[in-house]
Structures are given as structure tokens and as C-alpha cells.
Image: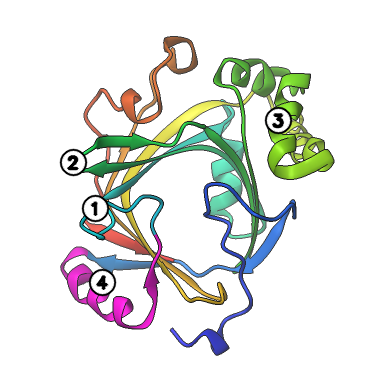
Amino acid sequence: LDPRRSEPAVNVAKAYPSTDKMFEERAELTYFMSADKAPAFIEQVGRQLEVHAFHWSESEEPPPHYVTTLYFDSDTREIVRACESGHESVRLRAREYYDRDPELGILREPLLWLEVKTRAGASTRKARFAIPSDEIRSFLTDGSITRGMIMLQRPVWGESAEAVLNEVADLCNHTVGPLKPDCLAHYRRRAWQDAEETIRVTLDTELAFHRPPANLFQSGMTLSEALVTPPVAQPPFCLVE
């Protein structure tokens, strides 16, 4: 966990970025860890890095934080096959963040984030932005970029918001057939980082994978509300990045 041994990384997990940089590059390493080692891991990392949380309760302890991630793919599973190859890959996913506060209940972030993540070895680049849920289907079907999408991004990204949207549209146009919801992943996330934001550690537990409902974007459900059927897989391990 020595920051001097890691390449500089920018914390791109903040809900509202304070920078207008469109693409952040970082070194990202992922590890599998048995669940019984999680308590000791949490204790040791907490001694060296500060806890990073979106909300804080009145007890000054961060409430449990959860992430629901929706992955997209084509009927021919082009994206997942590219990831399995081990070479450079591009993934499209939507994410919802929320906390389970013991006093206030569910604290859900008001925006659905759409992300494009490119990986080449340990190097990753990620662009993320909010998108109106009622425009997702047309955007993924024909790569259309509406004025509403761009205007929603400009308060955060500035005039260059269209560049990120174009990258997603380009991915949509290079698959055989339109992209559609393929898999829902749900997990609890704990995060730590140093004051200089040169290193960030995350621990994902309670992993579960679900099939997304066919009418996901027409039903008005949030991603976490779409977890209506039993998971198709619940790995016994944790993920560390």
C-alpha cells in the first residue's frame, strides 16, 4: 500500500467530479480474496488509508454503501468475449449508487451513470456521465445523441461533453446489432484512499449477479429495484482493486 510504488491515479469514483478532464488513465490491479479474510483486510487498510464515503451518518461512521452495475452487450456477446481474451477491451455499463443509512433509510444518488471503461493490461481509462433514463434505449439502439444528453453533461464536463457521448456512440455502432442489458451485478463497496489521491483501494463483498428484466428501461425501476429474481451466481470470494 505504499503510494510511491503505484502510478499516479485520479479518484474517478467521486459522484461529482471537480475536474473537466474527460478521460483519466490509471494503473488498476484486481485481486480475488476469500471472504473470511475481509475483516482483517478492512482493519489493516484502515490503519494506512482514510475511508472514502459518499454519505456520513450522525455517528460519524459511513453507512453501508452499495453499487448496482448493469453491463451491456450484443446478442453475439462481443464485449464479454473481448474481455475474456485478455487484450484491450472496452466495456459499457450503467451504475447506481446508494447507502443504507440506519436512520435515514436508502440514500440513493439521483443520477444514473453511464460509463465506458477501456482496459489494456493494468492500464485503464474511464469516462462516466449521467444520462436521462428515458433516452437510454434510443441511444444504445442507433447511437443517437440528443441535445438533452449534452446539456445534462455540460454543468460537469463543460463544452466537451459531446466527446464522451461520441465515444459511447462509436462503441454502439461497432457491434453486430444493438447493445442491450446483459447482466446486473450487485455488491457492497468499501473504499479507502490517501490524502493526495495517488492510491485508492476498494473492497467489494456480498457479490451477486442477476439477469436484468426485459422491460428494465420501460418500467421506471432503478437498477437496484430491478433485482427482483434470485441471483444466478453468488461467488464466495471478495474483489479487491
User: How far is disc 3 from disc 2 in space, using C-alphas?
Assistant: 42 Å
Chain-order first, disc 3 or disc 1: 1
- Residue at 55% in and 37% down: 113
Asked if 21 appears above or below 183 in the picture, the reply is: below
Which x, y percent locates residue 87?
Answer: 64, 59
User: Does label 1 or label 4 sit earlier along the sequence?
Assistant: 4
Residue linked to disc 4: 42
Q: Which residue is mark 2?
A: 103
* Quadrant location of the C terminus in the rendered image: bottom left
What secondary structure prevails in the magenta region? helix
As helix, strand or loop, the secondary structure at mark 2 comes to: loop
197 lies above or below 215: below
Which residue is labeled 1 in the image? 58
Q: Report the span colored magenta.
A: 35-52
- Camera-nearest label, 1 or 4: 1
Q: How many marks?
A: 4
